[in-house]
Image (tube, rainbow, N blue to C red):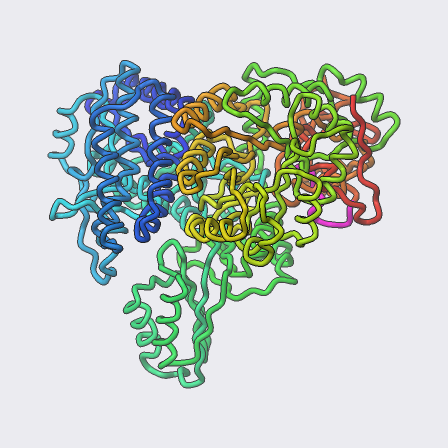
């Protein structure tokens, strides 16, 4: 990073994920020191902790009906836990902020209503609390840092025609150069830390900049200070040619022009908020994007000279939740002013139109959920008024898939093969941007991800010496891995045994019993938990069940079949070591399980309403929906209104009444928010909510915080810190004497202990794309196709040879989704070589099938 003048400012903006862990705060401190060493003054702008803005919205909703207490306590403990992790504890200002938030919510509960002004004041507390902690941490690290209230430096500007709520909840600010502001900040010291997302209005009231507003705050402040540069620090190392979490072959975009970055951000890329580009563009301030957790990676540079100007598709973007409004009337043909009348209706309803497609007798417009209130009541009101002009049809949910790059019109003739992907899709709208930067299709939302994957495979092709398209996500983190000292996995040391297995089987799941036993023992050693139950749906292999059972871990089952299998696999298994958690199962299944004497969790009012006699005299656990789902994919997020699991907080009073009427004792509370979670706060928040809810149920003595403990996908990725996890949950439990905590992990116990071996059958090259085919595919391991899951793949036969070829690893199943890994670095690979797919011990063989009448891989335990 080049040096700057001592009088110049650099603005560093950090997102919610970046400011939520000690590891990231250590990196933040290092970045601040490095920028200071280069001579600049540093303004740190950061967001609320990850998920806190959503939590505050839920708190407001809960306060309206007087049920905010458990959510508020969870939010408070989330911040206290981070303060303890950072080693800074509490402070008078921290307590003052919490008291103020508590008071605001009590007012909402007392009035049963909340106006936009107070909503903004409540929502601002996420940033105020987080930055109070951040400033104290930097000072504790011997960095001369001053906390500054952004509301005194950013003033909202009037917005003509904006709805009244926007003035408080989605404000814009003046970003002209401000010498007086610069003088004020110069006087505060060399490092200043402030909030994103919030600003003040002319009356001195708190206003919000809308979702993603922290990026915009950074840009506003950079422009007003005429900063040397703006750096956006997030959880991915730059902008990519697609979402790297769902498209592993996505490539880093090294350099972009402002308008290209604007188009990619506006088309659905979430790494950068579209509104943050204009202020820095007008001020000609260069913008960098980096990853907080891997600050050594090169990132993306956005400037007036970025990009190469060539006609090229640089990104395939998707934006979901789009609603189309189709207007149809033969009378509009040549009618003067029809569109003006129609758009006046959209304006009256505060609706911002994104795209427009017209013909002689119809007009279709798209509405972006990021810019509009698309709740059903708002749409119904819009349709009613438009219906006075013409026939109206609302279509959705849709996905907007965009090809983004410069001079798109100049390469339309090269897109023929890509357009063939749409042959079996219903296309509602096609548009080509007036600025020649995108070509967009609107399709059914369910088809969006599949189209992005196919389009990316066809269109994103780097050329030698490419200054824009950089390495893939896999290559970036492969470089990181090679540069870091990481422990070798068990399959390195047992390579000879694995190759011997592969000599007998073309494909096989192989488990290391010692690794599985060690994982179970590590969990049994946690001091915070009285009971550990293994979620056996992750892998029901009988030999592994016996190994796990020998450690004292019990079993969590979700079906009668799993219950019977557990009893058959583990001789003498005590029924009280089994926790049965059915979901929408038949009455007979509940009756059978109760007859066997296992512990039972219910997750629906219906079973108590319809079958009360079944539960008379019984003790049960209750699964609670805390309202927030987490996890690596939407299919594994198991809480929230769109999840079928659990009883929502608002129905707990009804559950208590039904249980009492049935003569049933609720002795435990359970919540599971999702899988693949690294954030310890997910469990502490869940535990705090359940401990608060437990006060309503005098017989409760058990709090089950679920599972979902993440397993690192890549070797350079930090594992979940069990010691910190144990300490954080222990602190929560200490505040609730009389309650014992349970945990029910699945994948964490078995994933790392299993690998899938597959023999190479064929190789193929199509232009610049290389394929390596193996003896099994999605019939044995469906996670990559179903979740977009990433598994490390190595050539076990040539493990010691350098990986020099970028290949797609595919199986023999007659499906285009039968891909085990996109763009993987392998040594030159040939027929007969043995590939190893790592971290395959969970949800592998358990989810396999005989699709295409191909047998899935056999199982062996070492």
643 up-or-down from 759: above or below: below
Left or right of residue 845: residue 691? left
Q: Quadrant of the C terminus?
A: top right
Image quarter of residue 758: top right
Locate residue 667, reporting x and y percent: 52, 38
Q: Give the range drawn in magenta.
A: 813-824
Q: Nearer the viewer, residue 395 or 516?
A: 516
426 up-or-down from 135: above or below: below
| Residue depicted at x 34% and y 27% | 80
Locate residue 319, reporting x and y percent: 47, 52
Magenta-span inclusion, residue 40: no
Locate residue 684, reporting x and y percent: 44, 31
Q: Can residue 599 be seen in this view?
A: yes
Q: Quadrant of the N terminus?
A: top left
Left or right of residue 61: residue 428? right
The residue most toward the bottom is 331
| Residue depicted at x 41% and y 42% | 696
Left or right of residue 790: residue 509? right
Q: Is residue 283 visible?
A: no
Question: How many marks can you see?
Answer: 0
Q: Which of 426 and 748 is in front in this view?
A: 748
73 up-or-down from 502: above or below: below
| Residue depicted at x 48% and y 50% | 655
Magenta-span inclusion, residue 823: yes
| Residue depicted at x 29% and y 36% | 127
Q: Which of 354 and 709 is in front in this view?
A: 709
Q: Nearer the viewer, residue 378 or 829?
A: 378
Locate residue 533, reporting x and y percent: 62, 31
């Amino acid at each position: 990073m080049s040096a700057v003048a001592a009088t110049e400012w650099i603005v560093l903006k950090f997102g919610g994920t970046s400011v939520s862990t000690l590891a990231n705060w250590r990196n933040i401190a290092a970045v601040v020191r490095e920028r200071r060493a280069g001579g600049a003054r540093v303004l740190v702008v950061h967001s609320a902790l990850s998920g806190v803005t959503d939590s505050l919205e839920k708190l407001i909703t809960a306060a309206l009906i007087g049920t905010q207490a458990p959510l508020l306590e969870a939010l408070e403990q989330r911040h206290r836990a981070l303060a303890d992790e950072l080693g800074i504890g509490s402070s008078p200002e921290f307590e003052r902020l919490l008291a103020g938030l508590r008071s605001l919510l009590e007012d909402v509960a007392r009035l049963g209503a909340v106006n936009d002004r107070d909503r903004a004041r409540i929502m601002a507390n996420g940033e105020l609390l987080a930055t109070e902690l951040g400033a104290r941490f930097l000072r504790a690290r011997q960095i001369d840092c001053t906390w500054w209230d952004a509301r005194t430096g950013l003033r909202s500007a009037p917005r003509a025609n904006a709805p009244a709520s926007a003035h408080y909840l989605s404000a814009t600010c003046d970003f002209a150069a401000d010498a007086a502001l610069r003088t004020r900040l110069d006087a505060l010291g060399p490092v200043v830390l402030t909030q994103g997302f919030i600003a003040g209005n002319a009356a001195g009231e708190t206003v919000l900049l809308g979702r993603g507003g922290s990026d915009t705050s950074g840009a506003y402040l950079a422009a007003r200070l005429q900063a040397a540069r703006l750096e956006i620090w997030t959880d991915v190392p730059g902008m990519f040619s697609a979402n790297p979490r769902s498209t592993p072959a996505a490539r880093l975009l090294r350099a972009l022009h402002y308008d290209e970055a604007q188009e990619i951000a506006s088309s659905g890329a979430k790494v950068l908020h579209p509104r943050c580009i204009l202020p820095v563009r007008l001020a000609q301030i260069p913008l960098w994007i980096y990853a907080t957790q891997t600050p050594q990676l090169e990132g993306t540079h956005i400037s007036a000279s970025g990009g190469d100007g060539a006609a090229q598709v640089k990104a395939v973007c998707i934006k979901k939740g789009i609603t189309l409004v189709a207007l149809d009337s033969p009378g509009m043909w040549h009618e003067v002013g029809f569109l003006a009348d129609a758009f006046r209706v959209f304006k009256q309803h505060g609706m911002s139109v994104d795209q427009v497609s017209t013909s002689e007798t119809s007009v279709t417009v798209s509405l972006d959920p990021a810019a509009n209130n698309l709740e059903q009541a708002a749409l119904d009101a819009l349709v009613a008024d438009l219906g006075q002009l013409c026939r109206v049809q609302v279509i959705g949910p849709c996905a907007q898939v965009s090809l983004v790059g410069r001079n798109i019109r100049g390469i339309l003739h090269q897109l023929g093969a890509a357009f063939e992907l749409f042959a079996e899709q219903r296309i509602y709208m096609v548009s080509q941007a007036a600025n020649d930067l995108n070509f967009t299709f609107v399709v059914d939302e369910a088809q969006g991800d599949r189209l992005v994957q196919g389009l990316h495979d066809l269109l994103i092709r780097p050329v030698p010496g490419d200054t824009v398209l950089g390495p893939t996500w896999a290559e970036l983190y492969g470089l990181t891995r090679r540069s870091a000292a990481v422990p070798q996995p068990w399959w390195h040391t047992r390579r000879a045994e694995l190759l011997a297995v592969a000599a007998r089987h073309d494909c096989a799941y192989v488990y290391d019993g010692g690794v599985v036993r060690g994982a179970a023992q590590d969990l049994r050693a946690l001091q915070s938990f009285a009971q550990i139950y293994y979620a056996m749906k992750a892998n029901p292999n009988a030999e592994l069940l016996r190994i796990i059972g020998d450690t004292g871990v019990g079993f969590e089952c979700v079906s009668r079949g799993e219950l019977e299998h557990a009893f058959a696999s583990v001789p003498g298994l005590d029924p009280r070591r089994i926790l049965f958690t059915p979901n929408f199962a038949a009455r007979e299944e509940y009756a059978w399980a109760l007859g066997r004497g296992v512990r039972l969790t219910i997750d629906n009012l219906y079973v108590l309403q319809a079958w009360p006699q079944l539960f008379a005299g019984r003790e049960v656990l209750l699964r609670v929906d805390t309202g927030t789902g987490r996890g690596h994919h939407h299919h594994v997020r198991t809480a929230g209104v769109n999840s079928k699991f659990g009883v929502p907080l608002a129905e707990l009073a009804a559950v208590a009444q039904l249980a009492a009427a049935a003569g049933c004792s609720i002795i435990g509370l359970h919540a599971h928010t999702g899988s693949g979670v690294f954030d310890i706060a997910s469990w502490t928040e869940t535990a705090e909510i359940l401990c608060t809810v437990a006060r309503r149920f005098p017989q409760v003595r058990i709090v089950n915080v679920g599972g979902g403990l993440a397993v690192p996908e890549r070797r350079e990725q930090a594992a979940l810190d069990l010691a910190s996890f144990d300490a954080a949950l222990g602190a929560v439990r200490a505040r609730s004497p009389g309650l014992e905590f349970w945990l029910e992990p699945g994948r964490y116990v078995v994933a790392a202990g299993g690998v899938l071996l597959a023999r190479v059958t064929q190789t193929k090259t199509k232009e610049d794309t290389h394929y390596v085919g193996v003896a099994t595919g999605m019939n044995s391991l469906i996670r990559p196709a179903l979740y977009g899951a990433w598994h490390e793949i190595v050539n076990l036969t040539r493990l010691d040879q350098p990986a020099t070829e970028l290949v797609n690893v595919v199986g023999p199943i007659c499906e285009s989704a039968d891909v085990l890994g996109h763009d993987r670095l392998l040594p030159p690979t040939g027929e007969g070589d043995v590939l190893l797919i790592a971290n395959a011990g969970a949800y592998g063989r358990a989810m396999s099938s005989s699709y295409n009448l191909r047998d899935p891989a056999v199982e062996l335990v070492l």
